[in-house]
Image (cartoon, rainbow, N blue to C red):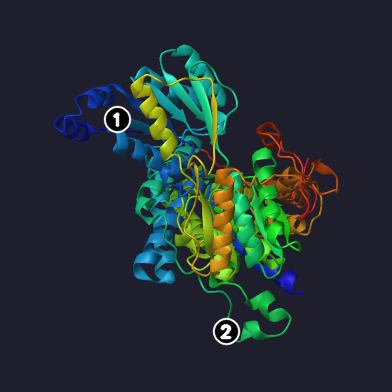
Amino acid sequence: MFKSVLKKAAGAVAVAAGLAAMSAQAADVKVGFVYIGPPGDHGWTYQHDQGRLAVEKELGVETTFVENVPEGPDAERVINQLAATGHNLIFTTSFGYMNPTLKAAKRHKNVKFEHATGYKQAANVATYSGRFYEGRYVVGHIAGKMTKSNVLGYIASFPIPEVIRGINATIRGARAVNPDATIKVVWVSSWFDPGKESDAAKTLIDQGADVILQHTDSPAPVQVAEERGVWAVGQASDMHKFGEKAHLTAIIDDWAPYYIERTKAVMDGTWTGGGDTWGGFKTGMVVMADYNKAIPADVVELAESIRKGIIDGSVHPFAGPVVKQDGTVAVPAGETPDDGFLAGMNFYVEGVDGEMPQ
Amino acid sequence: MDLFVAIMVNVAAASTPLVFAAMGELVVEKSGVLNLGVEGMMLMGAIAGFAAGYASGSMLIGIIVAGIAGGLLALLFGFLTQHLLANQVATGLALTIFGIGISAMVGHSFVGISLDPIAKGIPFLEDIPVIGKLFFGHDILVYASFVMTALVFYFLYKTRAGLILRAVGTNHDAAHSIGYSVIKIRYMAIVFGGAMAGIGGAYLSMAVNPMWVEEMTAGRGWIALALVVFATWRPGRVLVGAYLFGGISILQLNLQAMGVTIAPQLLAMLPYLVTIAVLVIISRDSGLMKKHAPACLGKIFHASS
C-alpha cells in the first residue's frame, strides 16, 4: 500500500546549483497524502495525485501516498502511521477523513494536517476545498447555448449542499442565456459506479436531454454521450479521451498550486492551521479544460467572459435575484449571498425539473 | 413506445452481467461449493476481456479471454479449497480482495482508453416494426445469457452429468462412496463459475461501458451471489431475479427523470427490496426449497472421512 518516492537525485542537483538553504529545508520536509481511491480513477484521486507530483517536481521534497484508504477507523491508523514516520505535513483528501484527521492531529501536535472538503479545524489542522460551482456556472452557459431540446441531464450522487449547489449553478448559467432551458436530475446514490452512471446517462438521453452533466466520478457518462451523439461535460478531470466529439469541456480540480503553497509554508515556517481555504478560478483551484472545437467562437467567448468576470468579481453565480423553484426569492436583486449561504444551500432554483429529495 | 423500447434495451444491458455471474455461481453452489469471490472474478474478467479486446480488435477474443481469466482465478480458489481444504468463506472473500488488487494492477496501463462497444441489434430482424427493436435490438451477449440459462437448466435437470453434480452437492460422502470423484467434479463446477463471472465482468467493460476503471463492477458480484440464494438455486428464477433487479434499477432512474417525487435513497433500495421480496414469496414452499438447496453447501470434503 505504501509507495515512497524519493527525490534524492533532485535534491542533489539543487545543492549543486547552489540552492543549499532551500534543499536543506526540502530534505527536512516530508509530505504524506491519503487517498480515498486509486490514482488511476481518472477523476478525484487522480487530480490529487497530480498535485502531489507537482509538489515533488516544484520543491524537490519527498512525498508518500497511501491509496484506497476507506473512510473510518482504518483511515486513522494510516494517518497516524504517516505522522509517526516523519511526515511533517499530511493531506487527507476525502470528506470522511475529517474525524480521523482531527484525532491524529491531537496525538501528533507537531505534525501539520490539511483536510479536503471538511469543516472542522484545529491549531494544526487546516481545511480546503474548491468552488466547483464557479465552473458549473460557466458550463451552464455553454450547455444553455448548445442544447437543442432545452433539456439538460444531470447525474447526481447524494443530496448534500455541495451537489445541490452544482445543479443550481448549472441551470442558472443555462437560463442566463436560454430562459427555456430546464434540467432533469437523476440521483444514483453513489460517487462511483460506472454501470449505474451510464444507465442514468442513457435514461436522461432517452427522456430528451442532449447535454449530460455529472457530479459522479467515473467517465462512463461521457462515453455514453459520445455513443449517443449528445454533449457531455467532464467531472474533476479532463475526460475528453472518453468522448472526443461529445466532451464540451470539463471542470478540473487543480490542487497543485495549493499543495505547493502549503508545502512551501511549512518549509518557511509560516504555515498556520485553523483556517479554511475555498479556492476557485481566482486561485487556480478550479480550471476549465480545453473547449471542444465544435463550440461556436461566440459561445467560447461568452464562457471565457463569465470565467474572467468571476475572477475579477463582476460576476457571481448566485448574484440576486436567486429565485427558488416555488417562486419565492432566496436572494433579492442587487444582493450577493455570502459563503455561509452557499455552503448550506438546500433548495432548487427555477428551472430544475422535479422536486428536491429531502 | 420508443421510450419503452429504450428502457427495455437498458434493462437487458443492466441485467445481463448478473445473469452470467449468477448462473455460474448457481452451478458452483449446486456442486456444494460456496465461492464468495464472484466480485473478484468479475473484475478479473472485466480487465482481461477489455485488454484482449483492445489488443486483438476482436470482441469474441475478448470475451473468450475474459472467461479464461475468470476461470483461472477460480482455479486458484479450487486449489485452495479442494486440495488444501481451506475454509471456503474465507478463501472466497480473499479471492474478491485479490481480484480487486490484481485487476487494478494489470489494468493500470489501460486507464483512459475507450473501446467501440459490442454492436447492438440483429440485422433485418431489428427493423421489424414495433417488436423489432424490443426483441432483436440487443447485443449478442444478451441472447447468449438466455441460451446459457437454458443450457444450465438442461444440464442440471436433464443430463446424467447434471444429476451427478447435484448428487455431489447434496451428499458428497454418498457420491464418493459410489465412485464419483467429488473433487474433480467440484473443480469443473468452480472453473465454470469463474468463467461465467469473467464473462459477466467483461460485459460491463466491453458492452455497458467499453473502458476500464478500477472496481468498475461496483458490487454486482455480491448481488449475483444473493440472487442465487433468493432464487433458491433454480436457474429460471435466477434469470427472473436478475431481470427484476435490472428492471427496477432502470425504472427508478426513469421515474426520477420524469420528475416523480420519491426519495432517491428509497428508489436506490427498491431493486434490492423488490427482488428479495418477490423471490422469497415465489420460493416460500419450504419442501421445494429443501429439495433444491445443495445440502453440502460450503462443507469441506475429505475423502478419508
Which of the 4 image quarters holds residue B141? Answer: bottom right
- Give the residue at mark 2: B123
The answer to whether B136 appears left or right of B53 in the picture is right
Q: Is residue A221 above or below residue B228?
A: below
Disc 1 crowd rating (10 Å Cα; few below 14, some 14-19, many 20+) is many
Give the spatial CA distance, label 1 vs label 2: 59 Å
Q: Residue A237 shows which numbered tag?
A: none
Q: Residue B51, percent across and down?
A: 38, 60
Q: Quadrant of residue B60?
A: bottom left
Quadrant assignment for the N terminus of chain A: top left
Crowd class of label 2 (few under 14; some 14 to 19; many from 20; radius 10 Å): few
Residue closest to the eye, B131 or A174: A174
- For label 1, the residue is A62
Residue B243 is situated, as x and y percent measured from the top left of the image, at 68, 60
Q: Residue at x 68, y 81 (%)?
A: B132
Residue displayed at 38% across by 52% down? B107
Can see residue A1?
A: no
Residue B139 appears in the picture as rendered: yes
As shown in the figure, which amino acid type bears the numbered disc 1? Glu
Look at label 2 and name its amino acid: Pro
- Work out which quarter of the rendered image holds the C terminus of chain A and state it: top right
What is the chain letter for disc 2? B
Q: B107 left or right of B248?
A: left
Residue at the farthest right position: A327
Which one is in front, A42 or B192?
A42
Task: Choose between B118 and A227: the one closer to the eye.
Answer: A227
Tell me what residue is drawn at x 53 percent, y 46 percent.
B32
| Chain under callout 1 | A
Helix, strand or loop at label 1? It is strand
Q: Secondary structure at mark 2?
A: loop
User: Horizontal and vertical percent for residue B1?
Assistant: 77, 74
Closer to viewer: mark 1 or mark 2 = 1
